[in-house]
Image: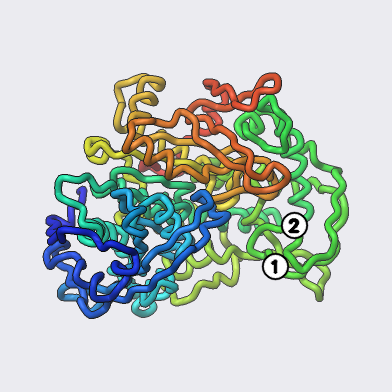
């Protein structure tokens, strides 16, 4: 059932905005512009909780999602309670100078188990003329993560916490924020206030939670969403179970050698040799990991994590040298093949070739002189805390855990959190009817959330909305309001140091705004190189399902339709009876 909470918005508009940011950024002025009672049914705002903080000439610099800018803003925080519930939720809204306000509101999300990203997203929102908001979800303060209060006691879930994290807190912050924006900036009822969302990873999932349930937004920019929560979080343990099952624990340097060889072979498959694997689908079709057996590798002793990726990053590592073994390749290939049950039925997919094996990071035992299993903390917590309902984030052992065990864990988590955290509802017809737009993108070499996860959701929406149309016809129809882009070589929610010449869609929000407000739909997503010698270079990203190919010295790819390549992104997840959207 689609939720439609936040039934009425009473703005109580003033006749004129504050003349200056300094006038706006006073407790008295901000308190006088709080959303009126009844703005959100069941919420009571604490009128005395308002705090204002003025910041001048703040540099938005090297921000993953916004261009460099210098801004001044007022951070206005206040709190509210839910009627009949003894709780307290804090929200913060960053307001630009009234002269820079562009009739926009921006909602933001978090990452990992955090429901906000601090100042990074909201300050970027200010740079595009928006009042930008964040929430603490009612978890205690803006720095407290959702798992801190997930359990009331061992075995007892704090379901209010789950639903706030799942979708409710962002929605409440958005409804209140739109009303507050209208009051604060004296937006008349005849003037359109555009509402946007920006987030990546968990923030991407939170964005989809709003798109799938509500009609508060005019546009959403979402990157690498951590939806399909049960599958995604157990996926973090899959590499560890592979190592345990095959009884081989490769050093980080040995796995890095496999990745580097993959990049070297697959880089030119798009017609351009630039150190970026833009066609990981062709890589899957043409590269064989067995070809790396016997490749020599060397990594100097380091205090920085032996290869620079994974949960062990930052731990001291010894000198690593040798040749890539058949056992290491078996581990790598099994990881890339994705989780299958013991009958051979596929339960989930894995990362693309050329992504680093972050989940497979091992730890060095100085006493034995051997590399050992290092269990993913994120994946482990979803077993101990979210499935077993024990107040611990540490999974101490994988003894006895088989691929079938993992499938059972996914199924149980899926059932438990289908209505709160799974976030894969494919029927976007009401959002579509509202006229809103979505820009969705995912780094093709993401080592935390498989790029195929986003492809599968886009394909699910396409097939659910347009079941009677051909693939090409339905793709074109879906692109009327939902456009998806795979970012060549990019990692998780940003640039990839292993493929530094790849760009990242730093200005996706500006392109979304242009689409929503001016009708300019992006056929190519703009990307900016942020690492290496090509830093600052502009690139173009093809819209799915088209894939990039270069010829000659072209700097803009030809976006081609390649059915064989598209097929590599599609999986029959037949380990489950229910469809996996």
Give the residue at mark 2: 307
Q: CA distance from mark 2 to mark 1?
A: 10 Å
Mark 1 residue crowding within 10 angstroms, few (<14) / some (14–19) / many (20+) = some
- Image point (88%, 53%), residue name: 322
Q: Are marks 2 and 1 in contact (CB under 8 Å)?
A: no
Count of numbered badges drawn on the protein: 2
- Can you give x and y, in whole percent of width and height, for residue 443 in the image? 56, 43
Q: Earlier in the sequence, mark 2 or mark 1?
A: 2
Position of 75 with respect to 226 (left or right) is left
What's the mark number on residue 522? none
Position of 328 with respect to 311 (left or right) is right
Helix, strand or loop at label 2? It is loop
Res 521 seen here? yes
Model colouring: rainbow
The picture quadrant where one finds residue 477 is top left
- Can you give x and y, in whole percent of width and height, for residue 51 in the image? 32, 76
- Image point (49%, 63%), residue name: 58
Mark 2 residue crowding within 10 angstroms, few (<14) / some (14–19) / many (20+) = many
Position of 268 with respect to 126 (left or right) is right
- Can you give x and y, in whole percent of width and height, for residue 137 in the image? 33, 68
In front here: 441 or 538?
538
Give the residue at mark 1: 314
- Can you give x and y, in whole percent of width and height, for residue 547 in the image? 55, 27
Image quarter (top left, top right, bottom left or bottom right) of the C terminus: top left
């Amino acid at each position: 059932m689609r939720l439609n909470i936040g039934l009425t918005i009473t703005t109580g508009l003033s006749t004129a905005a504050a003349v200056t940011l300094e006038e706006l950024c006073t407790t008295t002025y901000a308190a006088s512009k709080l959303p009126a009672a009844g703005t959100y049914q069941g919420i009571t705002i604490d009128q005395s909780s308002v705090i204002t903080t003025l910041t001048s000439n703040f540099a938005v610099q090297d921000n993953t999602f916004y261009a460099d800018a210098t801004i001044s803003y007022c951070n206005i925080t206040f709190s509210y309670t839910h009627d009949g519930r003894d709780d307290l939720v804090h929200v913060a809204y960053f307001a630009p100078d009234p002269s820079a306000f562009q009739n926009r509101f921006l909602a933001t999300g978090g990452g990992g188990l955090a429901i906000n990203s601090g100042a990074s997203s909201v300050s970027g929102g200010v740079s595009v003329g928006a009042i930008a908001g964040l929430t603490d979800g009612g978890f205690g303060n803006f720095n407290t993560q959702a798992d801190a209060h997930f359990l009331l006691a061992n075995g007892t879930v704090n379901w209010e916490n789950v639903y706030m994290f799942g979708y409710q807190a962002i929605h409440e912050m958005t409804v209140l924020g739109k009303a507050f924006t209208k009051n604060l900036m004296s937006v008349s009822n005849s003037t359109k206030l555009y509402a946007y969302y920006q987030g990546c990873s968990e923030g991407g999932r939170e964005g989809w939670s709003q798109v799938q349930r509500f009609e508060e937004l005019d546009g959403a920019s979402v990157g690498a969403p951590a939806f399909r929560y049960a599958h995604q979080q157990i996926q973090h343990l899959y590499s560890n179970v592979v190592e345990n099952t095959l009884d081989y624990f490769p050093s980080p340097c040995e796995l890095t050698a496999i990745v580097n060889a993959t990049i070297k072979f697959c880089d030119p498959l798009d017609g351009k040799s630039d150190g970026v694997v833009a066609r990981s689908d062709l890589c899957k079709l043409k590269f064989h990991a067995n070809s790396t057996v016997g490749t020599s590798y060397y990594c100097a002793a380091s205090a920085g994590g032996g290869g620079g990726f994974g949960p062990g990053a930052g731990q001291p590592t010894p000198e690593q040298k040798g040749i890539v073994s058949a056992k290491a390749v078996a581990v790598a290939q099994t990881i890339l093949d994705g989780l299958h049950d013991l009958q051979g039925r596929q339960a989930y997919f894995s990362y693309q070739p050329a992504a680093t094996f972050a989940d497979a990071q091992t730890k060095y035992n100085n006493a034995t002189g051997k590399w050992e299993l290092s269990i993913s903390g994120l994946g482990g917590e979803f077993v101990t805390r979210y499935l077993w309902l024990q107040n611990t984030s540490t999974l101490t052992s994988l003894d006895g855990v088989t691929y079938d065990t993992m499938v059972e864990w996914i199924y149980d988590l899926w059932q438990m959190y289908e209505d709160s955290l799974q976030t894969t509802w494919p029927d976007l017809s009401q959002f579509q009817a509202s006229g809103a737009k979505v820009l969705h993108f995912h780094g093709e070499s993401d080592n935390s959330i498989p790029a195929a996860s986003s492809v599968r959701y886009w394909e699910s929406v396409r097939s659910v909305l347009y079941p009677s149309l051909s693939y090409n016809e339905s793709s074109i129809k879906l692109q009327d309001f939902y456009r998806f882009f795979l970012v060549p070589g990019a990692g998780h929610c940003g640039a990839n140091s292993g493929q530094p010449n790849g760009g990242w869609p730093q200005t996706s929000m500006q392109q979304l705004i242009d689409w929503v407000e001016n009708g300019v739909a992006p056929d190519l997503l703009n990307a900016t190189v942020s690492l290496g010698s090509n830093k600052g270079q502009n690139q173009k990203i093809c819209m799915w399902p088209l894939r990039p190919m270069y010829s000659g010295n072209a700097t803009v790819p030809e976006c081609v339709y390649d059915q064989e390549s598209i097929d590599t992104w599609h999986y029959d997840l037949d380990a489950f009876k229910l469809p996996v959207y």
